[in-house]
Image: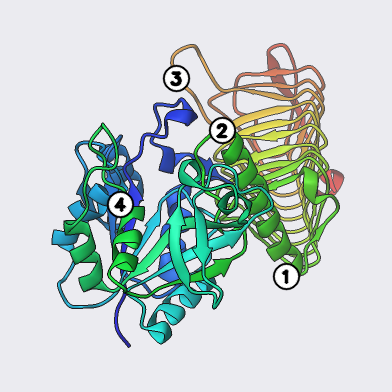
Amino acid sequence: MEQVHAVVLAAGKGKRMRSDLPKVLHPVCGQPLIFYVLDALHHAGISSSIVVVGHGADRVREAVGAQARYVEQAEPRGTGHAVLMALPHLPDDGNPVLVLYGDTPLLTAETIHALTALHRTSGSAATLLSARVPDPSGYGRVIRDGDGRVRKIVEEADCSSEERQVMEINAGTYMFRQQALREALRALTPGNAQGEYYLTDTIGWLLGREQQVSALVASAEETVGVNSRQELAAAESLMRRRLLDRLMEGGVTIIDPVTTYVHAGVQVGPDTVIHPQSYLEGATAVGARCTIGPQARLVDATVGDGVTIVASSVERGAVGEGSTVGPYSRLRPGTRVGRFVEIGNFAELKNAEVGDHTKVHHMSYLGDVTVGARVNIGAGTVTCNYDGTRKHHTDIEDEAFIGSDTMLIAPIRIGKGAVTGAGSVVNKDVPPGGVAVGVPARVIRYVTAERRR
């Protein structure tokens, strides 16, 4: 099977976006627009891609990395000129060339496959992607003859009153026979006073020489391009629904898709239920049989099976099997919660390791801490980890009982089975089994293992 070369047009500034960020790097569901286009090409089996960059070229290169090769269009001289810049970098091997925009995130690999197949079977010099939309305002119209063959593309400003009624629009994605593309580009002339060359004019040039042009009608959704903040929001909504549908097809219950927000890289196991106003972002992975939300936010989080997270956030951390978090708690970066742990309301954990079966129920702050298994953290406990210059670590060993309103002045170690009294300020290590009370706390006695149980 012949190879297909792809040219991705990503040089535009996107003036209507009113942004310093290159248009193709604006995110949809947590991923830059151009990433979706490159993913679609990859899944369509097209590995030879050239990205034409211009405005913000270095930032686009940095974001995309080694996924493609790059050509820079130093002056914004139109889409035809952009493809012309890419031609010397394409192998002159006769294989077809796919030209598409980097701001069309909803285009699928299946449609690229279908476009490629039609191009091959029709023997056309060019095959373009079109769509039928209820409101074609602002788009070029695809005009066909009585036999359905493409006869011309007419920009809206040049449409007759009859042509304005045509609902089939040019979507801006083209597959060319390589030699036909090279010849048509060489023949282009500037289309306006700014000296810009339009890729659309190649279609007219080919048709004017009796060469065949075909068109594949795609869904209107797939052809959506992003040129404004409004169109970015529309693409976000469509992509989010697509991602949620994929999760639901995999066995996930989404109570209200309209108020559930997921990123492209999110994974969720079967029989998990996601409640409204929940946000699953970045590389978040959620296990099976979980309850997420309402009002949960997970960012680059790893969540085991059977976890419940209600009205709380987990950022770049992990929650183990069977644990519960919330409501109204925050697990900050670096926090790793073990199995069957209970994190209650108004708890904040940062860079914390929490062992299995531990309880952190109410209004506590645990920062820069290692907590063992089967520990009880009383309400109002604070690890005082910052001395004004440096952060210090706290170690709380297995089966310790930390009384309510305890202040643990780091660096400090609370030994296995040790107890602190309510309201204590602990500024020295407490040995295993020790009972420390007071301000500052001192060890007043020891408890046996039997009594601890």
Q: Identify the residue position indicated by label 3 in the image.
A: 390
Measure how far apart labels 4 and 2 are at the Cα level: 26 Å
Q: Quadrant of the N terminus?
A: bottom left
Question: Which of the 4 quarters of the picture holds residue 120?
Answer: bottom left
Q: Identify the residue position indicated by label 4 in the image.
A: 65
- Give, as a three-letter code, the residue at label 3: Arg
Visible residue check, residue 258: yes
- Give, as a three-letter code, the residue at label 1: Gly
Measure how far apart labels 1 and 3 are at the Cα level: 47 Å
Label 1 close to label 4 by CB (< 8 Å)? no
Q: Identify the residue position indicated by label 2 in the image.
A: 229
Q: Residue at x 49, y 74 (%)?
A: 149
Q: Identify the residue position indicated by label 1 in the image.
A: 250
Q: Nearer the viewer, mark 4 or mark 2?
A: 2
Where in the figure is residue 407, as x and y percent of width and height?
A: 69, 19
Q: Secondary structure at mark 3?
A: loop
Q: Residue at x 86, y 53 (%)?
A: 255
Where in the figure is residue 257, as x and y percent of width and height?
A: 79, 51
Q: Secondary structure at mark 2?
A: helix
Label 1 close to label 3 by CB (< 8 Å)? no
Vertical position of residue 347 compared to residue 150: above or below: above
- Give, as a three-letter code, the residue at label 4: Gly
Q: Secondary structure at mark 1?
A: loop
- Give, as a three-letter code, the residue at label 2: Arg
Q: Nearer the viewer, mark 2 or mark 3?
A: 2
Where in the figure is residue 283, as x and y percent of width and height?
A: 55, 52
Q: Residue at x 46, y 44 (%)?
A: 158
Measure how far apart labels 2 and 3 are at the Cα level: 43 Å
Vertical position of residue 442 compared to residue 32: above or below: above
